[in-house]
Amino acid sequence: MREKNIPPLLAQEEVSQLLNVPSQRLEEAYWKGTIKNYQKHNLEAIQFRKGLGSVEAGTMVIMGEEIEVIRGFPKIRRTLLLKPALEKHFTGGNVAVEEKMNGYNVRIACIDHRIFAFTRGGYVCPYTTRKANEILDLDLFFQENPDMVICGEMVGTLNPYVSHYYPEVGKLGFRIFDLRKKITNTPLTVMDKRELLEEYGLEPVRLLGIFSVKEAPKKILEIVKDLGYKDREGVVMKDPMMQLEPLKYTSSQAQASELEYALSYPFDLARAFLFSRIIREGFQAYEMAETNDELRERALRMGESIIYPMLGTIKKVKEGEIAAEDLVIEVENQEEAEEFIRHLRDLKVMATLVEIKDGKAVIRRIHQSTNDKVNNYLQGGLY
Amino acid sequence: MREKNIPPLLAQEEVSQLLNVPSQRLEEAYWKGTIKNYQKHNLEAIQFRKGLGSVEAGTMVIMGEEIEVIRGFPKIRRTLLLKPALEKHFTGGNVAVEEKMNGYNVRIACIDHRIFAFTRGGYVCPYTTRKANEILDLDLFFQENPDMVICGEMVGTLNPYVSHYYPEVGKLGFRIFDLRKKITNTPLTVMDKRELLEEYGLEPVRLLGIFSVKEAPKKILEIVKDLGYKDREGVVMKDPMMQLEPLKYTSSQAQASELEYALSYPFDLARAFLFSRIIREGFQAYEMAETNDELRERALRMGESIIYPMLGTIKKVKEGEIAAEDLVIEVENQEEAEEFIRHLRDLKVMATLVEIKDGKAVIRRIHQSTNDKVNNYLQGGLY
C-alpha cells in the first residue's frame, strides 16, 4: 500500500486549511481509502468516498486555476412522525416546505470555465454534465456567481438513475433545491435562493408553503397525502433561514414504489430496502390516524407492491429472460453511450449497451443475484 | 482461556469414538466455544452450540451410567417451489407428507431412568420436561426402547415459546414426527415409526398422504392451501424410507402470522424475519398460479400482517405500555415459574414474572429495542 505516494494535491497545506482537517488526518484517510485520487474528464481531483470530520462524503477537491472545493451534499434525515419531530427540531418557529422530487441528486459547479455535474458520491456524470449544459442556461449565472454550487434533482423519464414521470417535466428536467457556497457548503436562505434563481430564469423545486411549527404537521400531512395521490414523492422541510438541518418525509405511494422497484430484483435490492420502508408506513399510518378503509388500502398497496413485482420477475426469468432493467438515455453517438456505461462501471453497476436507435441508447443493467437465485429455485434449488 | 481444563467427559476417548470426531477437534471446538460444559438439572453434559462435522448443533453428550449421546435435530431445508424441488430431491419416487405443526421442537429421551425434554439448542427445558412427563405416558416406551429419542412438536396455547391454538389440542399437546436412535440419529421409517407409536398409544403428527413424486406437487399445493384456510402451518415432506433429507413447505397464512408476530416488535424481530417470509410468498404465488382475486387477497393478507401489528405496538407504547408479550404457563408453585424464567435467561431472553394465579404464571418477555425506539420516535427522534 504505502508504495504509492500521496497525490500532490493532497499534500498541499492549502487543502488542509480549506477543509479544516489536519494534513495528517487527510493522509491517513487516503491510506484507508476514505479519500481517493480522481482523474477523469480532465479533472485532477480528490474524492471523499466517506465523510471525514465535518467534510461530507461526496466532497471533491479539484486542482483548477485555484484549488476548488465542492462539498458533498449533506445527508437529509427523515422524520417518522411529523408532529413531535418538527416541534423538537424547528426551534426557529417556522418551517418552509419544498417538494422532494423523485430523481437523483446533482451538484452543478463551474471549474475553470467548464460546467460539471457531480452525482451524490462526487463522480462527474458525463450524461448529466452534457444534459445540464443542454437544458439549462448557466453561463451568466456562473459568470456572476462563480463560487456557487447549484444543488438540484434531475428528474424525468429519460433519466438513467431514477426514471419517474412528472407531467410538467416529461423526459428530462432539473429542479433546484439549494444554492450553496463552494468550500464552506453554506446555503442561501430559502427566499434568497428563490430570488437569485428567478433572476437567472432557473427553476427551483416547488415551495409548498411556509408554516408555523404549530400548524405545520397538519398541513404537511395534507400536502403529503395529496402528493401521494398524484404519485409524487414527498417533502423536504427547511428552516427558512437555513440555520437548521432540513428534514424529509415521504408519501405512502413513494414507499410503495420503492418497494416495487426493490422487489423486482429481490435478491439484489430487497434486503436493504424492505425494513426501512415498512417502518415508515407503520408510523405514517399511526400519525395519519386513518379510517379502517384507509388502513386497508395502505395494507393492500404495500402487499401488492411486494408480491406483484416478485411474481413478474419469476415469470420473466422462467421464460428465459434475464432479471435486468433497461435505462434509456439520449445520445448523439455510440461513444456517448459507451462513456456512460464506463461511468456506471466505475459505480460498480453491471451494464451493457443493447441498442442505439433514434438518438436513444438502451442500456441494460443486470441484476445478477436475482437472475441466478430465481433460476436456481426454478430448477429445484432449496432455500 | 486455556487456564480452565477440558471437561473430564470431553477428555474420554469414548466420546470421540461415539461422535466419530477426533479428540483434538473436540478440544479445539471447546476452546472456540462451539462446545460448552452443561451442568444443570443434575446432568453432567456437554452441549454443541454449533454443528461440528456431521454432529448437529443441539447435540448433548451426557455422563450417565454410560455415556449417552442425544443428537441435535437436523435442520430441515425449505422448498420455495414444490414441483422442481420434489422432482430433484425425492429420487426414491415417493413422498410422505406429514403435517408441520406450529409449536416448538422437542426431543425427549430417557437418561438413567429420568425423562428429559431438550429444546432445539440442547437445553433441558424444565417446563417441557415436567409437562412431557404429565401429558405422556412414556415409562413403558422407554423401558422397552431405551435407545430411542422421541422428536416432536409441543403445541397449544399454554406453550411459552410459540402459542398457537389447535382445536384438537387446546392448551398443550405433543405430536411426534420422528423416532431416532441415540448416538447415530438414525430415524425409523415413516411407517415403522407410526406402528411403534401406536403400540404405546403415543400420538404422531398427521400423515396427510403418501404420493408419487409426479402427483405430489399438485396434491401438496392443495393440502397446504387447505391447511392455510384452517390457520395451520404447513407440511414436512419425507422419503418414506427416511433415507433422504426431509423438506418443508408452509402456507401463506403461516407466513402472514410470522410477519404479524415479527412486526409487533419490529425493532427486535422484523429485520431477521421480513425478507425470507416475503420471498416465500412470491414463489408460492407463482406456483399456485393464482387468479387476480386470489393474488389480491394474498397481497392484502401480507400488507395487513405488516401494518396492523406495527400500528398496534405504536399505540400501545404511546399509551405508556411497554412492548412486551405475555407468556402463560401452568405451574404448581412460584419456584416452577422462577425456574422457567432462569431457563429463559440462559437463552438470553429477557423475562419477568408478572403474576401467578389459578395455577398459571404470566411471564412477560420484554422487547427492549422496540420499546426504546418507538418511544424515541414518539418523542420526535429522527430516523
Image (tube, coloured by chain):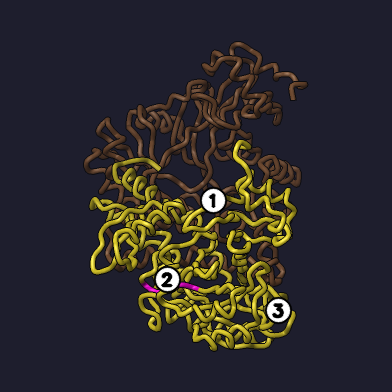
Chain colours: A yellow, B brown
Determine if marks 1 and 3 fall on one subunit.
no
Chain of the residue under the numbered disc 3 shown in the image? A
Q: What range of the chain is rendered magenta?
A: A153-157
Q: Is residue B59 magenta?
A: no
Circle 3 sits in a helix, a strand or a loop, which is it?
loop
Q: What's under tag 1, amino acid-wise? A: Ala
What residue does disc 3 label? Answer: A90
Q: Mark 1 points at which residue?
A: B272
Pinpoint residue B74: horizontal percent, then vertical percent.
47, 32
Q: Position of residue B383 (x, y in %)?
A: 63, 65
Can residue B270 be seen from the camera position used here?
A: yes
Q: Distance between the residues labelled 2 and 1?
A: 23 Å
x and y percentages locating residue B150 in the rendered image: 50, 31
* Comes first in the chain, label 3 or label 2: 3
Which mark is on residue A313? none
Q: Kindly identify the residue that appears in the image at 32 percent across and 32 percent down.
A: B240
